[in-house]
Amino acid sequence: MQLSENISTLKPSATMAVSSLAKRLASEGRDILDLSAGEPDFDTPAFICDAAVDGIRAGATRYTPPAGTPQLRKAIAAHLAGRAGRDIDWEGVVVTAGAKQALFNSIFSLFGPGDEVLILAPYWTTYPALVGLARAQPVFVGGDASNDFKVGPDELEAASTAKTRGMVLNSPSNPTGAVYTTAELAEIVAWARGRDVWILSDEIYRSIYYGTEGHAAPGLLDLPEADLGPYVLIDGASKCFAMTGWRLGYTYASAELSKKFAALQSQMTSNPTTPAQVAMLAAYTNVEAADAAVAEMTAAFQRRRDMVTTRIRELLPGVEFVDPVGAFYIYFRVDSFFDDEVKDATAWCSKLLEGQGVALVPGAAFGDDRWVRMSFATSDEVLEKALARIAAGVAAGAAA
């Protein structure tokens, strides 16, 4: 079959592929503990669901403007203004069908053939795929594991060329859970501004934060507007409000660029689903209820984070991992378990799934097939069972 060069190198999402396989095995009767999915295990808060139902009954089932309803865009702008401590232009907000579309709109609008885009590694598997769809070239920039893989101006400078047009920054990070401090962000922003490099800042996990710099992880809007060069902020409702299936994200950029995003979106998907926008509006206007829901979920994630890191130290002594400061993943190294048959994390995860019924995502999805990602967005009971099975699998491999 002859296909367009646009998709000649495109592959399915590695994380979604593992999750789909785990679900298929479970449907066949296998006892599978799926720790691959990147979504909260909580239900969407009731007040958000109720708003969507009420909206449907009130007739909120028709088209909206492609960029989203003005009411929702203004509510998101007010939320961002509260974060930034300054006015935010609501016309710079474009609501999208999930953060993936927000990223696609940004990458496809800003970059093209001949452009290079720096992607901080380990990276979410979708970033290089979207850069490739734009016919631009992803360039991977990795930091040292001892610093949670975070990079600074020196690494960025070494990786950049005259063709460098942008960079994708994700903090808190998927897959590592690492978080850039405000000072570290300021250094990256200064480097990018000095070279007129666009920063695409994916802050979808910002509210799931266990650090000390406030109630949410540091982000671009914590910096003075005068310090920022060209940027696009990407965020959404999926993670913080347990709304992954509602498919709601957004971008914030200049009003001029946002008009281009809206025009692109109008030709692709039209508007995000109208009832879902009504639900998202409730999340951003009922601030007290929303803050309580986010705080409750984050407290549970932090408790699980503490339990998982403690158990890994006990059950897998000596295994290197990134101690997550945000998001809900633990990223740990498994190449010490390789042998003549198991030569990479992909093979190790396959063996673990087949032998122990535990689904993890191999690091090949994130740029390093010596590591694996485990989600702790599930119950304490499942996490305890899974870690015990992983330890048993490691012990069986060592005995073999």
Image (cartoon, rainbow, N blue to C red):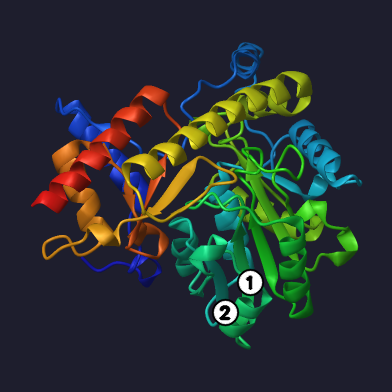
Q: Residue at x 30, y 47 (%)?
A: 17
- Disc 1 crowd rating (10 Å Cα; few below 14, some 14-19, many 20+) is many
Residue 335: which quarter of the image?
A: bottom left
Would residue 222 appear left or right of 163 to someone viewing this image?
right
Q: Position of residue 69 (x, y in %)?
A: 73, 34
User: Which mark is in front, 1 or 2?
Assistant: 1
Is residue 216 placed above or below 141 in the rendered structure? above
Evaluate whether residue 343 shows in this view: yes
Instruction: Residue type at mark 1: give it.
Output: Gly
Which quadrant of the figure contains the N terminus?
bottom left
Is residue 35 placed above or below 361 in the rendered structure? above
Q: Residue at x 81, y 52 (%)?
A: 222
Evaluate whether residue 62 shows in this view: no
Q: Which residue is mark 2?
A: 115
Q: Which residue is mark 1?
A: 166
Residue lying furthest left: 400
